Structure formats: structure tokens, C-alpha cells
Image (cartoon, helix red, strand yellow):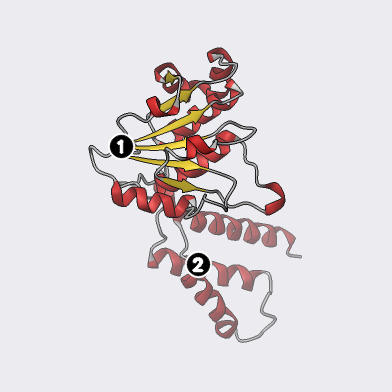
Amino acid sequence: MLDTLAVILVRPKFPENVGAAARACVNMGCPELILVAPQNWDKDKALGRATPMGADILHRLRVENDLATALAGFDAVYGTTARTGGWRKGVLSPANAATEIHDLRGPDHRVALVFGPEDRGLKNEDIKLCSRLVCIPTVPEASSLNLAQAVLIFLYECFKNAPNLPVQPSGSSESRPATFDEQELLYTNLQETLITIDFFKNENTAYWMLPVRRFLGRVGLRRHEFNLIMGVCRQVKWLAGRCKP
């Protein structure tokens, strides 16, 4: 989905965070992960957090000594920062950055998403290499995010803007919308069930059922919900029959 994007982790401290970032990459369809001067790098520790899904990305990642070398071949560079103000101006949110990236994307237009180390983030010399800055909004008293969480949030915003966004398969035809006939059948069954348990107390049945009809028309009932409520009605009728004197 995000085949022209790459995640670059600059001086990451913990291999476990690299593994979790790899998993985030595979979740969102980002095929490339680059490490710049990783500290305490241990692929085995990273694999444990990547899970089998992200293992391939870890096996294919490349390691560079400096950010400038890692950025060779990219057309746009988005650096992340928790610090704003001063000369760190024009900072985008992940959503706005994702929209901008989508507008710029092309088959040959490569974009790098750059994340700094867990303790201090990107240095000023790293920021100078970035064409745009991105800050993930948080409450002021807890502005620090886990590295892998930050990667996932940014990639998710890009994923939402991806062309041909896949629809989550339902796995069952039961999740289709209920038809008009099914809604009418359910309406009738609900009415019969309420009459069975003497819900209306000799009141005007049609009047009291009108809000039910409006409710069923408003909620966008699905087939599996239709089956569920029909089953409840069946059980209530059965229980009411057993309780009759």
C-alpha cells in the first residue's frame, strides 16, 4: 500500500522498539525500514517484538552510519519532533502530512519518514536534512511517545490516504444490510413478541410500535443483527409459553 515510503529510525536505543516498528510497517504496508547508527543493535531481540509478520522487514532492513547517506535517493523527507517553536516552525500534524504526501506521491517519488532516538529525538543537524517537520499532538504533560507507537500513528495516517484502500473482509454474508422484507419480518415478530408478554396493556399497539419502525429504519440494520434479534424474540416467546398458567 505504501510502497514508495520508507521509515528511517535514527540512533534507536532499544532493538525491541525496532522490532515493534517493523511490525507497524508490515501492518500498514510500508516495505522499507532503515536504521541509522543503531545503539545496542540485536536482531534476535528485535525479532521477538516484530512477530513473524514483521520478520521479513527486519531481515531486509539496511543500516547506515549517518542520516545523509540513508536519505540518498529520496525526494521528500518528513522528520518527526516533539519539540516545536524557535526555528522548528511550520510543523504539520500526521494527518496533514499524510495528505501532503499523498498529493506528492508518484511511482518514482520516494518519501522518507524520519524518527529520532527514544530519549532525545532528532538533533538539530538531523532536522536540517528534513524538508518538512511533523509533530504528533498529545497532552502537554505527556508529550513523549514510544518510538513504535509514533511510527504506527504516522503510517496509519498515510495508509488512510492510500489509493485502493482495502476493505476489511466481513468473512460472512451475514454482515450485509438487512433487506426491506427482513426488516418488515422483524417488525412483525417484535410486535407479536411484545403482545405475547402483554407489553402493551391493551393500549393502541400500532401507535406504540411506530417508534420501533422508525428505529429499525434509522439504525441501518445488518443481517447478523436481524438474526440476533429474531433469536431473542423466539426465546422470549418460548419462555412466555412455558410461564403461562
Please determine whether, in this image, residue 73 is positioned above or below residue 144. Answer: above
**Residue at horizontal 47%, vertical 24%?**
35
Query: Disc 2 on helix, strand or loop?
Result: loop
- Which residue matches tag 1? 110
* Mark closer to the chain start, 2 or 1: 1
**Mark number, residue 204:** none
* Left or right of residue 221: residue 190: right
**Residue at horizontal 42%, vertical 63%?**
182
Residue 231 image-quadrant placement: bottom right
Task: Pick the residue in front: 15 or 28.
Answer: 15
- Which residue matches tag 2? 219
Query: Disc 1 on helix, strand or loop?
Result: loop
Local packing at callout 1 (Cα closer than 10 Å; few below 14, some 14-19, many 20+) is: some
- Quadrant occupied by the N terminus: top left
Please determine whether, in this image, residue 144 is positioned above or below residue 186. Answer: above
User: Three-letter amino acid code at disc 2?
Assistant: Val
Of discs 2 and 1, which sits in the foreground?
1
**Residue at horizontal 56%, vertical 79%?**
211
User: Three-letter amino acid code at disc 1?
Assistant: Arg
Mark pair 2, 1: CA separation: 43 Å
Which residue in the rendered view is the most extreme toward the left? 107
Residue 183 pos. (x, y %): 45, 67
Residue 46 pos. (x, y %): 55, 19
**Residue at horizontal 57%, vertical 38%?**
149
Please determine whether, in this image, residue 92 is positioned above or below residue 23. Answer: below
Task: Pick the residue in front: 54 or 116.
Answer: 116
Residue 212 pos. (x, y %): 55, 74
Residue 151 pos. (x, y %): 51, 37
